Image (tube, helix red, strand yellow):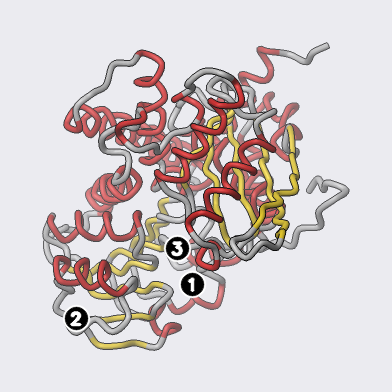
Amino acid sequence: MSKLSFVSPTRNSPWGTYLSQIDAVEPYLGPLARWVETLRRPKRILIVDVPIELDNGTVAHYEGYRVQHSLTRGPGKGGVRYHPDVTLEEVMALAAWMTIKNAAMNLPFGGAKGGIRLEPKALSLKELEKVTRRYTSEIGIVIGPQQDIPAPDVNTNGQIMAWMMDTYSMNTGSTATGVVTGKPIPLGGSLGRVAATGRGVFVIGREAMRRLGLPMDGARVAVQGFGNVGSVAAKLFAHAGARIVAVQDHSGTILNEAGLDMADLLQHLASSGGVGGFAGADTLADEDFWKVKTDVLIPAALEGQITAARALGLQTKLVLEGANGPTTPDGDAVLADRGITVVPDVIANAGGVTVSYFEWVQDFSSFFWTEDEINVRLDKIIIGAFKHICDTAEQHQIPLRTAAFVVACSRVLQARQERGLYP
């Protein structure tokens, strides 16, 4: 395992998890394995100081990052997260997974990711705007519509993207709508973008259930994380006839064996900010969430949730990774030993970046599609990509995660080989 001098990952840390995944795929790369070391090293890492004047007149400093893992197949593409636990190692791993995700979907992008270590809830709206604009100015030297295109991620949204787009445009002297995706519709955003990741989780889950012979009607589904991804996926599964029996978020864990009422739960979420205290369910201890009997489990929160210990207690048949990196390598090994199918993040949650690609294309052409057109194109791309990865898994008799990496890494390294090294 190759190591960088400035980071010492453990096996189950985000970057360590990614390196383990590259180690697992290397034997299937054939002659392209000559170039595999390029996947173990980010192309570019930018660490910036983000100073702002707070509302009370004091000056605060925040640490920000933008990592471009690979630009071999196109501009960097990946979100920006605001979170107090953001680290360089985490952003490196997220950027690398974006490389894999974009290549697995055959989108013309490389992989990138950004973040600022802060607690956004502790800032006023004005302070949040200041930190966003200063961060955008600091990373402006490496982003652009043909260089690197940020998008929303944890604790960022369309408003944040609007501020980023405006700041970049002011600094470059022309309106550049294509510098970010996930923007509000009036600024060149795409219809269908907000629900795209959750929709992708559902569509891939539906296809996986068909392959496994799991009926959708009455299927028991549990969802960890009930933000944009988890709530949309849950709503679509429920609409298709499944029962959402358990949900967990930052406010607690709830259970209803007969199935949660999605309309009531979403209304409760909007009014209270979390699922905790929902009247239509029982409260469950957080750790017991991982012991609920289900047909489908959707981890859609943060990375590193399904550890080996939790994997041993899971009572499910299918794991759909709505979050990035929610399963540790040790957890993955346990699930494989137990015969539990895992649809990896790089396939399961790729709906968002796919519609971000559509948004980027629409911005360049200044011609926008209807939401129905967006969903038809989205379904076609992700179903086709999933079929190709399933076929690869069957061909090599390997798990879906390894198969996704075989497909993605082969595409990246083939492009690397054909481009050659400069100078």
* Residue kind at label 2, given as amino acid type: Glu
Name the outermost residue toward the front. Answer: 57
Where is residue 276 shown, x and y percent of the image?
A: 32, 80
SS of the residue under disc 3? loop
Tell me the CA gap for discs 3 and 1.
Answer: 16 Å
Where is residue 73 shown, x and y percent of the image?
A: 58, 22
- Is residue 53 or residue 165 the one in the foreground? 53
Q: Mark 1 points at which residue?
A: 311
SS of the residue under disc 2? loop
Q: Can residue 222 be seen in this view?
A: yes
Badge 2 density bin: few <14, some 14–19, many ≥20, Cα 10 Å:
some
Q: Mark 2 points at which residue?
A: 257
Residue 366 appears in which quarter of the rendering?
top left
* Residue kind at label 1, given as amino acid type: Ala
Q: Name the residue under label 3.
A: 301
For the residues labelled 3 and 1, say whether their Cβ atoms are less than 8 Å apart. Answer: no
Residue 412 appears in which quarter of the rendering?
top right
Position of residue 140 relative to residue 23, above or below, is above
Residue 22 appears in which quarter of the rendering?
top right
Of marks 2 and 3, which one's residue comes earlier in the chain?
A: 2
Where is residue 31 shown, x and y percent of the image?
A: 69, 24
SS of the residue under disc 1? helix
- Is residue 388 or residue 371 the one in the foreground? 371
Q: Residue at x 26, y 38 (%)?
A: 192
